[in-house]
Each structure stands twice: as structure tokens, then as C-alpha cells.
Amino acid sequence: DGERAGLTLGTLVSLSLDPPLVGFAIRRDAALHELLRRAGTFGISLLAAGQDSLAQHFARGVPPIGLWQGIELVDESSPPLIAGAVGWLRGNVLAEHTAGTHTFFVGEVLSAERGQAERALLYLRQGYGPA
């Protein structure tokens, strides 16, 4: 329906190479949770070192209406992908599993693309830095 939302994931895990599957958990009260369930598709931007302000922006839970204002995107396709990232994944939700306050989503990766950035952003010991 054209709605865009985003959030910073605490963890993204590789579940399988054949077929390519990833997993991630989202709080059930997060704005993105129901949008993801309805859309059934996702885009993941693997942020680069130096993009910690973007990670913080999407971790704050800013209302979706202003979430993407001023954010440079790869293109205008949907779901949105953030420019300058180390890489991007697009996929479809295959399964959902309730896990306490979260839902664990299993996603099939339909495309994976490498960006030009050399170093990924890492969050460790309550701080951001290069991987």
C-alpha cells in the first residue's frame, strides 16, 4: 500500500545458503511489525562504518510519516534501501514465530547486492564502530 517504515535490527542471522534464508526478530508493538506482516516483503540495508547516525535514527522509533525524510536511497523502488551501505538484501517473509515480546521472521532472500563501502557498521559494548 506504499507505506514505508524502517528500524534498526539488533541481530540478523543467516539461516540457510540453499535456499538463502535470513532471520530477524521485531517487537510486536513496533510500527514496522504489522506493516511487514501485511506486505510480506522486506529490504535490508547492511549499514557501512560511518552510518551510525542512520542506525540511531531508525532505532529511535520515529513516527513513519517522517522516517524517510532526508534519507538518501539507492532508488525509488520498494522496499527502500539506504544509499552508501555495505550491501542490501530484498526478500519475502516465509514464516513467523512468536517469541515472547517479539516475532521471529524467517525470510527468503531474493536478491543480494554488494555496495561500494568497504567496512560494515558494528554495534558492540553499547557503541558503534567499524567491523
Image (cartoon, rainbow, N blue to C red):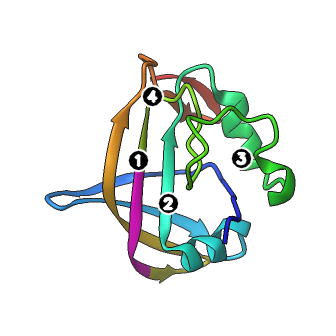
Mark 4 or 3 closer to N-term?
Answer: 3
Q: Which residue is mark 4?
A: 86
Relative depth, front residue between 44 and 28 = 44
Is the Cβ of the residue at disc 2 closer than 8 Å to that at disc 1? yes
Q: Residues within 10 Å of mark 4 (few under 14, many from 20)?
A: many
Task: Identify the secondary structure beneath mark 3.
Answer: helix
Q: Residues within 10 Å of mark 2 (few under 14, many from 20)?
A: many
Q: From this view, report whether residue 128 is shown above or below residue 116.
A: below
Is the Cβ of the residue at disc 4 closer than 8 Å to that at disc 3? no
Task: Identify the secondary structure beneath mark 4.
Answer: loop
The stretch of residues the image draws in magenta is 90-96
Q: From this view, report whether residue 131 is shown above or below residue 65.
A: above
Secondary structure mostly seen in magenta is strand
| Amino acid residing under circle 4 | Val
- Quote the CA–CA distance across marks 4 and 1: 11 Å
Q: Which residue is mark 2?
A: 42
Q: Could you say where residue 127 lies in the image, as x and y percent from the top left?
A: 64, 30
> Can you tell which mark lies on residue 58?
3
Residue at left 51%, top 65%? 25
| Amino acid residing under circle 2 | Phe
**Residue 111 in view in this figure:** yes
- Quote the CA–CA distance across marks 2 and 1: 8 Å
Relative depth, front residue between 43 and 9 = 43
| Amino acid residing under circle 3 | Phe
